[in-house]
Amino acid sequence: MTIHLRRIVTAACVLPAVLITAACWTGSGPDGPQPVPAPPAAGALSEGAATTSLGVPSPGGAASLAGTVPAGTGPKAAPAGAGRALSGQALPTNQWWTSALTGAAAQPIWAHPLAVKNTGAGLAVSAAAPVASAKAVVTPFAPALTAGGPITAVRVTGYGAFHVVLEADLRGGGSVEATLVQGSPLLYLDFHDVTPSLTSTGALARSAGGGSLARLTVAGQRWDVQARDGVGWRQQGNRLTPDRAGGGAIVVARVPDSVDDARWTRALADAAGDPVIRTTSNMAYDGVSGTVTQTLGVERQSGKPSVWALLPHQQAGLVPGGGVQPMAGTYADPLGTLPVVRGTAVRVRVPMPGLVTEPPALALSGTARAAVLADLDRDLADKPATADGGSYFGLKELGRLATVAEVAKGVGAAPQQQAALKRLRAGLVDWLTYGGAGDTRYFAYDKVWGGLIAVPAEFGSGDYNDHHFQYGYLVRAAAVLAEADPAFLRDYGGGVDLVARDFTGSLATEGAQGFPAFRAFNAYLGHSAASGFAPFADGNNQESSSEAVAAWEAVTRWGIVSGDERLTAYGVTHYALEATTARRYWLGEQGERPAGYAHTVAGIVWDSKIDYATWFDPKPESVVGIQLLPLTFGSLYRGAPDKAAARAAELTRDVGGQPRVWGDLFAADLAVSDPAAARRRLTAKLPREDSTSRAMVRYWIEMLDAYGAPQPAVVADGPYGMAFGDREHPRLLAVNPTAERRTVTFRRNGATTAVVVVDPGQSIVRQP
């Protein structure tokens, strides 16, 4: 079975003038025009820019929103940097360039390998190499060149899935438009009503040659500056200007290390005046191969191919062909070495690591079942860690209750299941309804940016921080309740839909009302970002990779239960890609860290650095543990026994013994490699994490002891099954959270190995 996403967004870059449509070219020479990729097949989603208006959406049914955000709760910044074409729209937050919407681009905008910043003296461009230390790998902003002169204002005039267009007004008159593309070493500049100028920050050495290409060395780095054909360059000290009129459009490029000069020069030819005008990301899930393919597309005005720097996960999953031409040369980056390719699209294929969306069937011994029942009773007796918890702690409590209900269902403990569901329903209804003045928990619509603010807001969520982390708990909890309580789905499903739409973002259709095209997920990076406005010199960041993966698990589960195929497919595809990047960049399971960094795990991944740190606590347990919560049946993407064992050993070394906090999370992680050792840690004094159910930890350990670790050699239909244990004779788990009987097919190398029929709301394990 192959699931494709419906095409949602059709707009390209939102421009201040008429949109220019790229022509289609033919020919397949290595340096000549390449074919523009065909549009996605019918039913595929193209994630790109969209014009979406501000306006309070209606949830329908019994759910309700506040039409205004209470004073002191809403966003502290307005989109003052939005150009006229973006006025009145719901605008993206949490993107790598969102800081430019809130001001004058005073913080660097990091694009791998380039970064751009308004220094006041002009638009400065940097591509400095990262510097590693024991607890961080940091890329400094060290500008090599500055375009234009003193700036009075900067506006965002256009954007796409992974590019942004900035327009800077110059104090002396005129303006410069800059197109910055993630993954591109080329910065497209177009000067209007002013002579173009570039100034180096240090001594400017120009190599032999001439014509429209100026080859420069600044502080040991090579930079190329390309003008239009027929336009040369005049050098006065450390300043470059065109030698004649007609040179308003130029390209500034950081030359890769170990470059092939001839091919590089051909790639730059004609780039001036031919900027990127459209970037898109198409996502599709293939159930036969058990993979998700992301197609990143770039269109220049001419249709010619672009130059790309590939992130490590893109290199590992690069699909051969499609017109992608490898080029010599690399760039240094905190995430790893970035090689260079050329093409109009890059296809990246990642595994869909299985996703269990129903409590797995498990035959427990009498002793084990009694222990789970005792843990369920303790879970239900626990009071929330924060009784008046808001958008984070309050919604985490809903997530905890949902796992209690799931485990109770798994062991057939109907009284405990009903007790958890009753409390869960009361909590969800409280959040999904607004009762007017005096209501203490609800969602309000923000008419400034376009989104939902949970009241009371915690950890900066009024500024759109952490929405996918926080709201994912609610959406997953709602899916658990709705499966058991169809009346809740009927009455409050519309409200849950809106909460999910707030952090998915790209489900917004052209001309839709209420939400922007993008929120948490960043297409080129392959993962989400947590800061709404990214007011940091290091760019945007994400701390808890596991809460990000859990957000897409939540979207998947809600899509299944609510019967929304589009939402289900969105969740599956983003779950797969976020899980891949979580394992690589945060957990460090693939690739190597830069020399000098003394750890495997990273606590925070930024646009320009990685940190062995958290926002709240320096303990090693917190750095690692924030990548492990919440524990759900969707956490099995962290299922490699050797990686889990290595993680446990390194943490023991760093702590000097067993974890002092969040011991339940580490016991669960250890169970992937050693269930018996994990079980021995389940003492009455084991430290518990707020969102984690004791019964869930014990059930998880017993499940892995009985089934074995996840077995990726056999794949199942999307979020309806998973294989465990022996490669040749695995146990097959099939689940069905829907209201109708479902057939789940298991395959190895595309060939069917088993077909399992599962009744509604049930799970089946086929033994080897």
Image: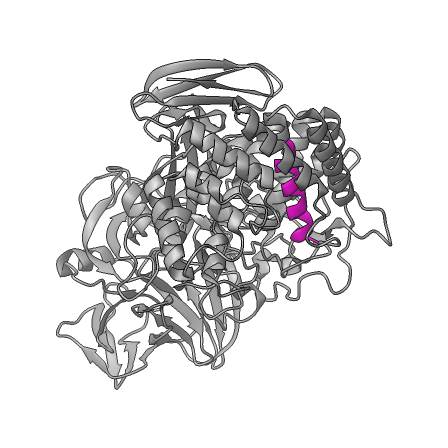
- Report whether 749 appears left or right of 437: left
Quadrant where the N terminus sits is top left
Of the pair 513 and 494, the residue shown nearer to us: 494
Tell me the colour scheme of the image: one colour
The spot of residue 247 in percent (x, y) is 32, 69
Horizontal relation, residue 486 to residue 204: left or right: right
Q: Is residue 368 placed above or below 28 in the rendered structure? A: above
Residue ID at (74%, 53%): 387
The front one of 434 and 683 is: 683
Q: Position of residue 671 (x, y in %)?
A: 43, 39
Q: So how many labels did they put on this image? A: 0
Q: Is residue 742 found left or right of 290 in the rendered image?
A: right
Q: Residue 486, can we see it?
A: yes
Q: Which residues are magenta?
A: 390-406
Residue 531 rendering spot, x and y as whole percentages: 54, 59
The residue furthest right is 437
Q: Quadrant of residue 696?
A: top right
Residue at image x 71%, y 25%? 486
Direction from residue 341 to residue 472 in the image, left or right: right
Residue 108: which quarter of the image?
Answer: bottom left
Q: Is residue 281 visible?
A: no
Q: Quadrant of the C terminus?
A: top left
Magenta region, main secondary structure: helix
